[in-house]
Image (cartoon, grey):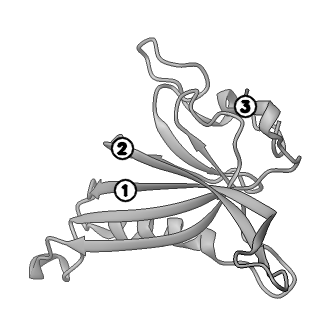
């Protein structure tokens, strides 16, 4: 199992109807160290999973094409979230965007960014991620609410952070 075990049953409130164990059928981002959590309001219509392999070209004298040496790889996850205000003063949209953005920052020199878990049913139940990018578009402004947005579309890029090395045989 990657990362420290987090008992989601203790930190997440179950829904009254029958739903997957541990998350109450809801989707969340949870900070691994802080256990801070944020519910994802709407299920993303799709997720993009990408695995890439780092290859270093090795130039050989007299050879027309280089040889390639595998150096490392990574698994990336990108998704887009939609948020709509649920508070009268509309301050929650900026708060949600900045909360996600905070996972791309550290708390000073010598510290790392906090790792996160994506609670998405059983899909990523043993995965720990680092936030690579958070890009958001905010809209539906109104002078009556000090131009705070009513909506945000947030593009997120995550990279899998494995504590143990995985092998090709783990997937076959």
Q: How would you rate the neighbour count of disc 3 (Cα within 10 Å): few for under 14, some for 14-19, many for 20 or more?
A: few
Residue 119: name its quadrant: top right
Number of dots carrying numbers: 3
Task: Tell me whether the residue at label 3 lies in contact with that at label 1, contact meaning CB atoms closer than 8 angstroms.
Answer: no
Q: Earlier in the sequence, mark 2 or mark 1?
A: 2
| Left or right: 142 as drawn, with respect to 97 | left
Dots 2, 3 in contact, CB < 8 A: no
Structural crowding at the residue carrying mark 1, measured as other residues with C-alpha within 10 Å and reported as few (<14), some (14–19) or many (≥20): some
Residue located at (36% from left, 72% from top): 136
**Disc 3 target residue:** 171
**Residue 84 in picture, x, y percent from top left:** 25, 56
32 or 74, nearer to the observer: 74
Image position, residue 20 (x, y; %): 53, 19
Question: From the viewer's perspective, is residue 105 above or below residue 25?
Answer: below
Q: CA distance from mark 3 to mark 1?
A: 27 Å
Callouts 2 and 1 close, C-beta under 8 Å: no
Asked whether 4 or 159 is in front, the reply is 159
Q: Residue at x 75, y 55 (%)?
A: 161
**First reached walking from the N terminus: tag 3 or tag 1:** 1
Residue denoted by label 2: 46
Q: How far apart in space, not on screen, are marks 2 and 3 (Cα)?
A: 23 Å
Front of the two marks 3 and 1: 3
Residue holding disc 1: 80
In this rendering, the label closer to the viewer, 2 or 3: 3
Ranked by sequence position, the earlier of labels 2 and 3 is 2
Query: Residue 106: which quarter of the image?
Result: bottom right
**In front of the other: 71 or 31:** 71
Report helix, strand or loop for mark 3: helix
């Amino acid at each position: 199992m990657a990362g420290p075990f987090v008992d989601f049953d203790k930190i997440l409130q179950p829904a009254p109807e029958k739903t997957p164990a541990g998350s109450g059928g809801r989707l969340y981002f949870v900070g691994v160290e802080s256990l801070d959590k944020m519910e994802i309001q709407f299920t993303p219509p799709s997720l993009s999973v990408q695995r890439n392999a780092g290859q270093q070209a090795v130039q050989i004298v007299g050879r027309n094409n280089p040889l390639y040496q595998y150096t490392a790889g990574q698994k990336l996850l990108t998704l887009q979230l939609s948020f709509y205000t649920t508070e009268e003063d509309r301050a929650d949209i900026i708060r949600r965007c900045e909360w996600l953005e905070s996972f791309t920052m550290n708390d000073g020199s010598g510290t790392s960014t906090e790792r996160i878990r994506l609670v998405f049913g059983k899909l990523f139940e043993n995965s720990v991620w680092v936030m690579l990018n958070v890009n958001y578009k905010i809209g539906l402004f109104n002078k009556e609410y000090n131009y705070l947005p009513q909506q945000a579309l947030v593009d997120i890029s995550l990279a899998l952070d494995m504590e143990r090395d995985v092998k090709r045989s783990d997937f076959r």
